């Protein structure tokens, strides 16, 4: 049985790698959407901070919601534990702690990402350079995932890493959808306009779902379709249902390996069943915000329960 300390290191290593990637995607979406606003782009940057759960910390340091200040806080600020630079640093520290559990290729990809992003984020980013920097962050985290998937044995080490990745990803998708959905409820004059479509498109881009959504829905940007795609579509790799399919699968694998079931198993099965059997009509009837808020809380509780069940410390 894997030591709780090692399981903890793998779980948080994967969460922080995923968080760095998610943060870059959020800023990318904010940048695209701010460009569509002829006035008051600060609202969009405020919504990016809300999605990141960093609005309170930001407001303690800054008074204006500008592209340069928000992106600097989310990319480079070491006092922000969820910034890209803090996330990659924490991921590397956890990876170093569990280095003997990782293949050489996985460790090297994490270490190289850390060195590369430290150089890249050493000084403030010019707004014109921001898209290039965000692409580099997404590329570095993708290289880590690729080396991990391509070289790691499918055992409990793999399971704890995957559980961390998908709990973090589900949290991020739910937050983006919750905040952006309400920011983007269109005024009547915008419905069906180019601006309206561009903003909905930006939600999809922030979770890398723009092109695949068009394959499924023929580029018809309906709010209910977008919510359905990001919550219930079992083939979309950042949807809530997809994430819980894999959280549940990897918890089942741990139960089989260790020969015991814990509270986290029943909890994940319950959440997965609710998603798998849900309909977007029922979710909208009960209230999308309420559904997402409950989901974010349940997801957090599950993460805490996994830590308890497997003696993380």
Image (spheres, rainbow, N blue to C red):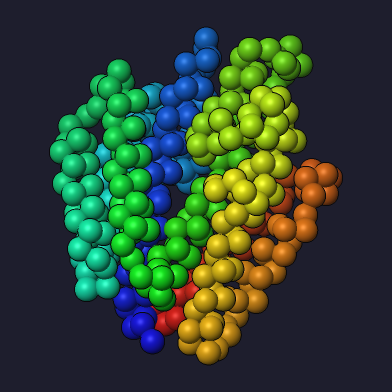
42 on left or right of 288: left
Q: Is residue 106 visible?
A: yes
What quarter of the picture does the C terminus occupy?
bottom left
Q: Nearer the viewer, residue 156 or 93?
A: 156
- Above or below, 269 against 285 in this view is below
x then y, percent, for residue 134: 34, 32
* Residue at horizontal 60 percent and vertical 80 percent from the top: 263
x then y, percent, for residue 32: 47, 22
Q: Nearer the viewer, residue 80 or 211?
A: 211
Residue 14, quarter of the rendered image:
bottom left
* Residue at horizontal 51 percent and vertical 59 percent from the top: 167
Q: Is residue 42 visible?
A: no
- Above or below, 147 against 176 in this view is below
Q: Nearer the viewer, residue 242 or 54?
A: 242
What quarter of the picture does the N terminus occupy?
bottom left
x then y, percent, for residue 274: 73, 61
- Above or below, 298 against 261 in this view is above
147 on left or right of 219: left
* Residue at horizontal 59 percent and vertical 68 percent from the top: 248
* Residue at horizontal 60 percent and vertical 60 percent from the top: 244
């Amino acid at each position: 049985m894997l030591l709780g300390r090692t399981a903890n290191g793998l779980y948080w290593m994967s969460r922080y790698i995923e968080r760095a990637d998610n943060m870059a995607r959020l800023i990318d979406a904010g940048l695209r959407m701010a460009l569509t606003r002829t006035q008051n782009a600060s609202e969009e940057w405020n919504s990016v901070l809300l999605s990141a759960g960093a609005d309170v910390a930001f407001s303690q340091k800054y008074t204006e919601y500008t592209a340069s200040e928000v992106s600097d806080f989310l990319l480079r600020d070491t006092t922000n534990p969820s910034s890209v630079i803090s996330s990659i640093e924490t991921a590397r520290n956890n990876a170093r702690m569990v280095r003997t559990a990782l293949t050489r290729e996985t460790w090297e990809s994490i270490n190289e990402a850390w060195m590369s992003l430290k150089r890249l984020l050493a000084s403030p980013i010019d707004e014109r350079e921001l898209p290039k920097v965000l692409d580099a962050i997404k590329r570095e985290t993708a290289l880590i995932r690729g080396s991990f998937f391509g070289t790691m044995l499918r055992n409990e080490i793999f399971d704890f890493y995957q559980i961390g990745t998908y709990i973090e990803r589900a949290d991020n998708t739910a937050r983006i959808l919750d905040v952006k959905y309400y920011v983007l409820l269109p005024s009547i004059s915008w419905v069906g306009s180019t601006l309206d479509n561009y903003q909905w498109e930006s939600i999809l881009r922030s979770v890398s779902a723009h092109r695949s959504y068009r394959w499924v829905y023929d580029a018809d940007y309906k709010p209910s379709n977008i919510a359905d795609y990001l919550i219930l579509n079992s083939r979309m790799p950042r949807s809530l249902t997809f994430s819980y399919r894999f959280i549940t699968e990897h918890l089942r694998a741990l139960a089989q390996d260790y020969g015991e079931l814990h509270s986290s198993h029943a909890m994940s099965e319950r959440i997965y069943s609710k998603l798998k059997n849900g309909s977007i009509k029922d979710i909208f009837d009960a209230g999308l915000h309420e559904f997402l808020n409950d989901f974010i809380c349940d997801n957090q509780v599950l993460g805490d329960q996994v830590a308890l069940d497997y003696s993380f410390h």
